Amino acid sequence: MRKTAFLILIAIISIASICALVIYIRMDGFSFAWALNFLLMLCVFAFTGELKSQLTSPYYDEKGWERRGEIYERLGVNFFRKLLVLTGWEKLSKKSNPIEKNTKALMHLHHQTKKSELDHVIILLIVLGFNVFVAVKFGVLKSLWLLILNILLNLYPIFLQRYNRPRITRAINLSQRRQ
């Protein structure tokens, strides 16, 4: 009961924060797109963190068309990875979540890729809704910042998680065989 109440409270605070954002920042500019994405990251991270789901859906399994990550490489996931290094995000991420070389740590990392992907899928869909609304109300050109930031801050991180997860799975399997 307490968990449900806390999840409802997070949802209410999230909706109120988004309403305040819509009221105080023009929806057709870069600042709104930037603020919306980061506000949603905070809200969704809190919500899914409290949810504590095991994330066992077959959605997270590697699909046949994803084998070896070639599709993601063609879509530029390696360039995105380099961009994360250049911006310092990778260093910051590794500092807060150091990678250890044991099966338990690899399994935790595997779960974190699923959680991160879920977070970004939720944000991607919400921002896409705002993107369509802004395109209809203000015009397609005014909605470009929402689209560009949604691709950079949500779509490519989803690609990256889907690209990395099979590699982590193979590392887990190797680690378990060695034990």
Image (cartoon, rainbow, N blue to C red):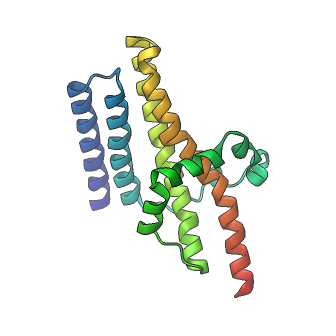
Residue 11 seen in render: yes
Q: Quadrant of the C terminus?
A: bottom right
Q: Is residue 146 above or below residue 116?
A: above
Asked if 135 appears above or below 37 in the picture, the reply is above
- Residue 60 in the image: above or below residue 97: above
Q: Residue at x 25, y 32 (%)?
A: 21
Residue 1 visible? The answer is no
- Apparent side of residue 113 relative to residue 72 in the rendered image (left or right): left
- Rendered image quadrant of residue 34: top left
| View extreme (bottom): residue | 179
Q: Picture quarter containing residue 33?
A: top left
Describe residue 43's horizontal placement relative to residue 91 as left or right.
Answer: left
Residue sitting at x 25%, y 26%: 25
Q: Measured from the top left, where is residue 159 in percent x and y? A: 61, 46
Q: Residue at x 75, y 82 (%)?
A: 177
Q: Residue furthest front?
A: 86
Query: Residue 62 location in percent, x, y?
Result: 71, 53
**Location of residue 143 in the rendering, given as x and y in whole percent from the top left corner:** 43, 20
Location of residue 27 (image quadrant): top left
